Image: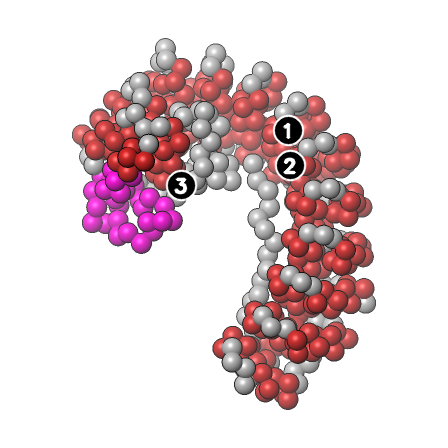
């Protein structure tokens, strides 16, 4: 297997040129322009490659999908792509290479088909490729129909919409799933009715693909159907993407139903997505429900996303609950996001600033950093003493810089204190002191400690 990986990797390195792009993060320093695509060598090396190795190679060519995930049923349908590839714009390939890749779509080898369709998927303006894929959408071989649907999703030609809608009735679940995924990438409203029809499909994968596709098409006509999926589907993955789709549509009419579902949902990943959706729709009426999840849910990710949601909604009545979580939650990430959220709300009531000053002693550098940033956002002069006390004992240069920024923004531009910091051995602290002496407006927004990325399907 190691030898097989070396062979395929070598072929990838010699073919990932300006026509397709660098392999990925490990090879970003390679100058693509001087390299050429050797299609024949790549396909020879791909023949017989184990699925995982092929999946790694394939994701290096082109990575599409939902938040880094590929289509639900790629040609290697049994493999979850472990690496997010780079979205790269392909240059036109020579006619001979196009013909070789089109012929390889009919290969019995799944890795050859996988690499071929991904490379062809970058030829967006090539009608020959579009025609070849449309023709194969009617193949008697389900694996080839699946490849064709995947390729049409990559290329998104307008002429593929109606054939893909027809493919939603295919007897093979993989074809239905990839056709739904492809229609979601087209974002064409003509497909909505057919996609909603798949919400009751026997295959979990097909239902998931159909729900996500409906979430990508801008329409509120599917809200009632998506709510039924969220409330009743047997698959947590499908319920999760239903919550995402409702949040994507900012379907405020669904907020009450989503809030009720949050209390009864057994799966943590679904609860997290419901909380995200409520935050994304600005569900002010659900603040108490979200705050309850933030304080009491057993899952760290749910509690953290709930803190983000409260800041996103912008409801200052949540400050009391956030201040409590700042000091009591066992998770560093939850405490840090709660500090960020308090800073976003910029409430100058005594409770929030006092809680932030207390967590300047937190064991976590990340929590202290976000608390210092939040104090700078609030700018409450009453916190200057606590900020100065923290600055005297803080050892992290990054946190000290944030504390200096907070001190300046709270009106504490003491020239004596800042001048003392000019003698710091850390250049970052010296720079912050200089900016502080120049005035509050001399600071850039750093640090801007966003919480971790919100959940997407």
Residue 269: mark: 2
Are the residues at dot 1 and dot 3 in contact (C-beta closer than 8 Å)? Answer: no
Please report the residue visible at 66 percent of the width from the left and 23 percent of the height from the top.
233
Sequence-first disc among 1 and 3: 3
Are the residues at dot 2 and dot 1 in contact (C-beta closer than 8 Å)? Answer: yes
Q: Position of residue 364 (x, y in %)?
A: 64, 61
The answer to if 20 sits in the magenta stretch is yes
| Nearer the observer, 294 or 350 | 294
Using the rendered view, name the quadrant where residue 115 is placed: top left
Residues in magenta, as a range: 9-37
Please report the residue visible at 58 percent of the width from the left and 16 percent of the height from the top.
202
Colour pattern: secondary structure
Crowd tier of the residue under label 2, counting other residues whose Cα lies within 10 Å: few below 14, some 14–19, many 20 or above: some
Please report the residue visible at 40 percent of the width from the left and 41 percent of the height from the top.
85
| Nearer the observer, 289 or 3 | 3
Please tell me whether residue 7 is drawn above or below residue 24 in the rendered image: above
Residue 85: mark: 3
Secondary-structure class at tag 2: helix
Using the rendered view, name the quadrant where residue 316 is placed: bottom right
Q: Position of residue 432 (x, y in %)?
A: 55, 77
The answer to if 175 sits in the magenta stretch is no
Sequence-first disc among 2 and 3: 3
Residue bearing mark 1:
236
Q: Position of residue 76 (x, y in %)?
A: 41, 26
Distance of label 2 from label 1 (alpha carbons): 8 Å
């Amino acid at each position: 297997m190691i030898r097989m990986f070396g062979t395929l990797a070598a072929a990838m390195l010699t073919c990932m040129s300006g026509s397709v792009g660098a392999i990925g993060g490990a090879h970003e320093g390679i100058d693509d322009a001087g390299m050429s695509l050797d299609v024949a060598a790549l396909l020879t090396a791909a023949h017989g490659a184990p699925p995982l190795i092929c999946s790694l190679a394939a994701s290096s060519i082109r990575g599409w999908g939902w938040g880094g995930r590929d289509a639900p049923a790629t040609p290697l349908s049994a493999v979850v792509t472990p690496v997010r590839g780079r979205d790269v714009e392909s240059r036109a390939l020579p006619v001979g290479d196009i013909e070789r890749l089109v012929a390889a779509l009919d290969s019995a080898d799944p890795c050859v088909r996988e690499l071929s369709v991904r490379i062809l998927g970058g030829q967006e303006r090539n009608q020959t490729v579009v025609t070849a894929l449309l023709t194969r959408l009617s193949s008697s071989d389900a694996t080839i129909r699946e490849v064709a649907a995947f390729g049409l999703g990559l290329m998104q030609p307008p002429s593929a919409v109606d054939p893909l809608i027809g493919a939603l009735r295919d007897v093979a679940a993989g074809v239905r799933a990839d056709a739904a995924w492809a229609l979601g990438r087209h974002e064409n409203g003509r497909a909505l009715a057919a996609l909603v029809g798949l919400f009751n499909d026997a295959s979990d994968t097909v239902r998931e693909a159909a729900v996500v596709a409906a979430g990508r098409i801008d329409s509120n006509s599917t809200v009632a159907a998506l709510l039924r999926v969220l409330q009743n589907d047997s698959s947590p993955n499908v319920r999760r993407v239903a919550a995402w789709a409702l949040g994507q549509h900012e379907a405020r009419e669904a907020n009450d139903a989503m809030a009720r579902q949050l209390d009864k949902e057994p799966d943590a990943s679904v609860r997290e997505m419901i909380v995200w959706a409520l935050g994304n729709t600005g569900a002010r009426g659900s603040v108490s429900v979200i705050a309850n999840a933030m304080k009491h849910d057993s899952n760290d990710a749910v509690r953290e996303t709930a803190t983000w949601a409260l800041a996103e909604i912008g409801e200052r009545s949540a400050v009391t609950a956030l201040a409590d979580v700042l000091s009591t939650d066992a998770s560093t990430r939850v405490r840090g996001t709660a500090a960020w959220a308090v800073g976003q709300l910029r409430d100058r009531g005594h409770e929030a600033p006092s809680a932030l000053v207390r967590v300047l002693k937190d064991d976590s550098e990340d929590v202290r950093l976000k608390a210092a940033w939040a104090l700078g956002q609030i700018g409450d002069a009453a916190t200057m003493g606590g900020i100065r006390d923290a600055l005297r004992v803080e050892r992290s240069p990054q946190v000290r810089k944030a504390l200096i920024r907070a001190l300046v923004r709270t009106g504490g531009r003491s020239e004596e204190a800042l001048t003392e910091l000019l003698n710091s051995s850390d250049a970052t602290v010296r720079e912050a002191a200089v900016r502080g002496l120049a005035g509050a407006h001399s600071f850039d927004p750093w640090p801007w400690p966003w919480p971790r990325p919100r959940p997407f399907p």
